[in-house]
């Protein structure tokens, strides 16, 4: 029994310099803060709920806008479940207000009798100056207002990214595809070269 107690007894450590203790303390404080900052940095990325991939392929995007969307409660719940489709949708300006047409937001199962209409027109929330600038561009020949993606911002509000776009001709699409393929080949060759 005496031997067991003696084995547990450890001699005291020699005193450390004060500077070393300060560094350890600073590290102990800063590590959790750095981890939290890294976590928040990843949180800033806004994962899109719905993306209009055809808009990137079929249109030349000239200018982007961010707009709020006026939604019902069941629509917000459906968006959080990523039940939206932007294909074939567009936005237009009527009597000084911007409207979103053709977006399909699936009905929310738990809404019961308070269901929303899936393909209804939805009001987009933009500043008057932005609406005026968009209206002037839309009056020019060849421009259209295309929704690119729907996402939730840091505050949890549903936002939409819109773009003033000009339709691409078939030869423009082919040119874009060849540039993308050339870039991919070049990146592949560079990767091989680095190894």
Image: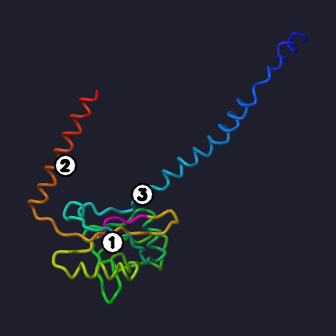
Q: Is residue 91 magenta?
A: no
Look at the image and give the residue range highlighted in magenta.
Answer: 147-151
Residues under numbered marks 3 and 1 in contact, where contact means CB atoms less than 8 Å apart: no
Dot 2 or dot 1, earlier in sequence = 1
Q: Report the mark closest to the observer, 2 or 1.
A: 2
Vertical arrangement, residue 38 with respect to residue 154, above or below: above
Dot 3 or dot 1, earlier in sequence = 3
Dot 2 or dot 3, earlier in sequence = 3
Vertical arrangement, residue 93 with respect to residue 75, above or below: below
Label 1, secondary structure: give it.
strand
Residue behind mark 1:
104
Closer-to-camera residue (9/37):
37
Quarter the N terminus occupies: top right
Image label count: 3
Closer-to-camera residue (108/62):
62
Label 3, secondary structure: give it.
loop
Residue at horizontal 20 percent and vertical 65 percent from the top: 59
Residue behind mark 2:
180
Local packing at callout 3 (Cα closer than 10 Å; few below 14, some 14-19, many 20+) is few
């Amino acid at each position: 029994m005496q031997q067991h107690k003696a084995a547990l007894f450890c001699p005291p450590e020699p005193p450390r310099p004060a500077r070393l203790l300060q560094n350890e303390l600073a590290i102990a404080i800063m590590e959790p803060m750095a981890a939290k900052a890294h976590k928040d940095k990843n949180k800033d990325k806004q994962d899109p709920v719905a993306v209009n991939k055809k808009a990137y392929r079929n249109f030349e995007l000239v200018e982007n806008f961010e707009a709020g969307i006026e939604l019902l409660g069941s629509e917000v719940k459906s968006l959080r479940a990523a039940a939206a489709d932007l294909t074939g949708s567009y936005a237009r300006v009527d009597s000084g207000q911007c409207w979103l047409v053709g977006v399909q937001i699936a009905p929310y199962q738990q809404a019961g009798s308070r269901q929303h209409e899936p393909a209804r027109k939805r009001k987009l929330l933009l500043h008057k100056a932005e609406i005026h600038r968009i209206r002037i561009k839309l009056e020019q020949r060849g421009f259209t207002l295309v929704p690119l993606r729907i996402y939730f911002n840091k505050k949890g509000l549903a936002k939409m990214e819109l773009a003033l776009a000009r339709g691409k001709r078939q030869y423009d699409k082919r040119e874009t595809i060849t540039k993308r393929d050339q870039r991919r080949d070049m990146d592949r060759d560079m990767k091989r070269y680095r190894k």
